[in-house]
Every structure is written in structure tokens, then in C-alpha cells.
């Protein structure tokens, strides 16, 4: 990396420790699922594994090493994520699942920071466009930031107008 470039926020060790903890303690997913999504993972293969684990949880199926490997194989993604050996290395790297929530918070924090960096770039584009209507530009910028903050606080909520439209 050159002097002016910085790596986007990520913590591969926390991602791997979290996945290992979830494979050791299948019940830990219940504490993590409400706040963490597969797209929050920096490393794509970790997001795929978490997505499979989350899908098993949502279907009320067990989510241990064997069932996650089986589901990945069924979906044709086991080799894409590094095979059963990668999943075994995740399990072997974490002695206990007691810190799973802490690892999840690290992964979530890094994801939020990456979204904030992306939002800043989108807001900069608005400024460089020099729009005639400054209030409209501010509204767009506020919406971009609002979307980042909503992703953190209201992941399962939908805007009221959408819910009402669906209802009626």
C-alpha cells in the first residue's frame, strides 16, 4: 500500500473466531443473528459460511460442523469456501464459544465503518455535482447517512409507508 492508501476496516481473526465459536456452540447463533448479516463479513467465504449457518438457524435445523459442511456441499459452495478443512481449522482455532458475541461486535463494527466510508464517497459525489438545489442535495446526503445508521439499529424494520402499502 502506498502512503495515501489505507485498508478498509476489517478483522479476519474476529470473523474466523466467530465462525469457529458458532460451529462449537450451535446455540450461540441465537444471540448473534439479530445484529449480524452475511454481508457484514469482509472475507466473502466467511460471509458464505455465516449465511449457511444463519439459514440453518432460521429453518430450526442444527448448525454444527457436520450440518454446515453438508449444507455447503448441497449448495455447491463447500470447495469455494475452502472445503471441510477450512471449517475444521475454524473449530480448532477457538477453544470456547464464550466470546462469540464479542467477536460478532467486532465484525459488525468493521462492517459499519466500511459502510460509512462508502457513504462518505457517495456524499462527496453529490457535493462535486454542484446541484442547483442545495436542500435537495442535503436531503440526499442525509438519506445516505440515515441508511447507514438504520442498518445498525433497525435491520428487521421496514418504513411505515411500505408496511401500510403492503397492508392495504
Image (cartoon, rainbow, N blue to C red):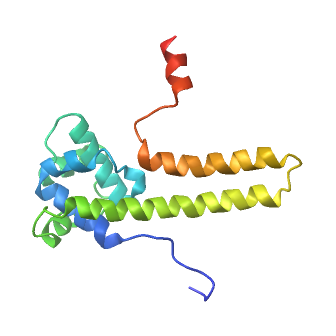
The x and y percentages for residue 75 are 31, 44
The x and y percentages for residue 14 are 29, 68
The x and y percentages for residue 12 are 34, 71
Residue found 29% across the figure and 59% down from its top: 104
The answer to whether 53 appears left or right of 129 in the picture is left
The x and y percentages for residue 156 are 40, 37
Hey, which residue is sitting farthest front in the picture?
Answer: 135
Residue 7 in sight from this viewpoint:
yes
The answer to whether 135 appears left or right of 123 in the picture is right
Q: Nearer the viewer, residue 151 or 45?
A: 151
Residue found 27% across the figure and 44% down from its top: 54
Residue found 69% across the figure and 57% down from its top: 123
The answer to whether 54 appears left or right of 149 in the picture is left
Q: Quadrant of residue 65?
A: bottom left
Q: Quadrant of the N terminus?
A: bottom right
Label count reads 0
Amino acid at each position: 500500500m502506498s502512503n495515501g492508501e489505507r485498508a478498509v476496516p476489517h478483522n479476519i481473526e474476529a470473523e474466523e473466531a466467530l465462525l469457529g465459536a458458532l460451529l462449537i456452540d450451535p446455540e450461540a447463533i441465537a444471540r448473534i443473528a439479530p445484529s449480524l448479516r452475511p454481508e457484514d463479513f469482509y472475507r466473502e467465504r466467511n460471509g458464505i459460511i455465516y449465511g449457511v449457518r444463519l439459514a440453518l438457524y432460521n429453518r430450526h435445523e442444527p448448525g454444527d460442523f457436520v450440518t454446515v459442511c453438508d449444507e455447503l456441499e448441497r449448495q455447491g459452495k463447500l470447495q469455494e469456501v475452502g472445503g471441510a478443512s477450512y471449517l475444521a481449522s475454524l473449530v480448532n482455532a477457538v477453544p470456547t464459544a464464550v466470546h462469540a458475541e464479542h467477536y460478532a461486535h467486532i465484525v459488525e463494527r468493521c462492517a459499519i465503518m466500511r459502510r460509512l466510508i462508502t457513504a462518505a464517497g457517495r456524499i462527496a459525489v453529490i457535493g462535486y455535482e454542484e446541484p442547483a438545489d442545495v436542500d435537495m442535495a442535503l436531503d440526499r446526503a442525509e438519506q445516505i447517512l440515515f441508511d447507514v445508521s438504520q442498518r445498525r439499529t433497525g435491520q428487521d424494520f421496514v418504513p411505515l409507508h411500505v408496511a401500510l402499502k403492503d397492508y392495504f
